[in-house]
Amino acid sequence: MEDEGVVLLGFWSSPYVMRVKIALEEKGIQFLYKEEENIFLSKSPLLLQANPIYMKVPVLIHNGKPICESLNILEYIDEVWKDKFTILPHHPYEKAKSRFWIHFFDKMIFDIGRRMWASKGEDQEAAKLEFLKSLKLLEEELGDKPYFGGDQFGLLDIALIPFSCRFYTYEMFCKFSVEKSCPKFMKWVNKCNERGSVSKALPNPHEVYDFVLEVKKMLGIE
Amino acid sequence: MGNDELILLNYWPSMFGARVRIALEEKGLDYEYREEDLLNKSPLLLQMNPVHKKIPVLIHNGKPVCESNIIVQYIDEVWYDKAPLLPSDPYQKAQARFWADYIDKKLYDSGRKITFHKNKEEAEEGKKEVLEIFKVLEGALEEKPYFGGENFGYVDISLIGFYMWFHAYETCANFSIEAECPKLMAWVKRCLERKTVSKSLGDPKTVYEIVLKFRKKLGLD
């Protein structure tokens, strides 16, 4: 890997990649973005070299050295580029809470997200209910704060907001409305979307939905 | 750091709880240990970890911290002045986090296939997966004494608790970890020489007996 400063390997629809894009933008870090265009069929040699264990995006390559896993990358970015826009909360307890909720959400969405667009009947319904239950828990965590980070947009906000571009997809498949069920959560989503870093990183939700339809076809899922 | 009240809610066979015990010991911290009966969880556990209702939970001056790797990071950040568990270099730190996360993502589930297998095929599958994971970890260890290099640290803490379950894995799937992964076992022996580790790990033979008990209860045997 050559030393090209900061390189981000990504795929346009990955919320995990969006997390990193948002963080880099908020920090004002110049970076070279490389899209893994054929990610399902053939991963680039660079990706396979940079992330041999998981072969997944995002990978941040800084001065030729790769960092993998989105949360890991966010913490790395925060530690290296210390002087502008702090991502992590200051206090260890708040750090622990943010990490806890990211872990909670990531574990949930990995299973539930897929079941919402790939399953049918009872399983899909159960997934939808689990999803809404999780959003309600997050609403409790948010409380009356403008952001999860308090007055400042921070780690947990950056980690969660990319998934909002998938809401339309979930709503179309599972016949519900996040706005109706979790208005507080949507209020936070809308507030985050006002930030340039977020609107730049997130694709159009309709494009995401069309893509999922294509993926379903490709995988042979009805 | 003044009058810190530390309570650890744990279940001694837990490889995750072991991480927290070791971290607390490494930092030389006084804490109250409370054993949980997982079939009859205490009101305190349910109150302190309402989302997952799982151990370990560290309660620091009344405030709960959950998820073992998150707890270890918390301990390292609060008591930053002694025995650092994570490297200070951001890239080395990212590598440490990566490997601890890898262990979390892979080892427990594959290990569970062995201990709570429904049939021989599942146990065999679990064994293959566990050995693959160990080989990857041996690769990450390279020729270093510890995953952290010269110093025992975060990744070592993340993994060593699983040693309590090695005998159970070996017996349930009929193989020898020493024979297949001698480098890993050398690392295990090195870690066990540390008092902080030997104090924090329960007896592997008793863990196996517990597995057998649960297998009977679940109707697997």
Image: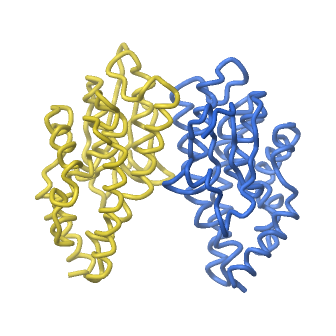
Q: How many marks?
A: 0
Residue B151 vs residue A209: left or right? left
Does residue B113 appear to the left or right of B217 in the view shown? right
The quadrant where residue A207 appears = bottom right
What colour denotes chain B?
A: yellow
Q: Return the residue nearer the eye: B51 or A10.
A: A10
Query: Which chain is assigned blue?
Result: A
**In the image shown, does A220 or A122 lie closer to the viewer?**
A220
Residue at 83% from the left image edge and 61% from the top image edge? A180
The quadrant where residue A158 appears: top right
Colouring mode (rainbow / by chain / secondary structure / one colour): by chain
Quadrant that contains the C terminus of chain A: bottom right
Indicate the quadrant where residue A4 lies.
top right
* Left or right relative to A63: residue B125: left
Rendered location of residue B65, percent (x, y): 45, 38
At horizontal 69% and vertical 83% (from top left) the residue drawn is A221
Q: Residue at x 27, y 55 (%)?
A: B37
Q: Position of residue A193 (x, y in %)?
A: 85, 44
- Left or right? Give the position of A184 relative to B73: right
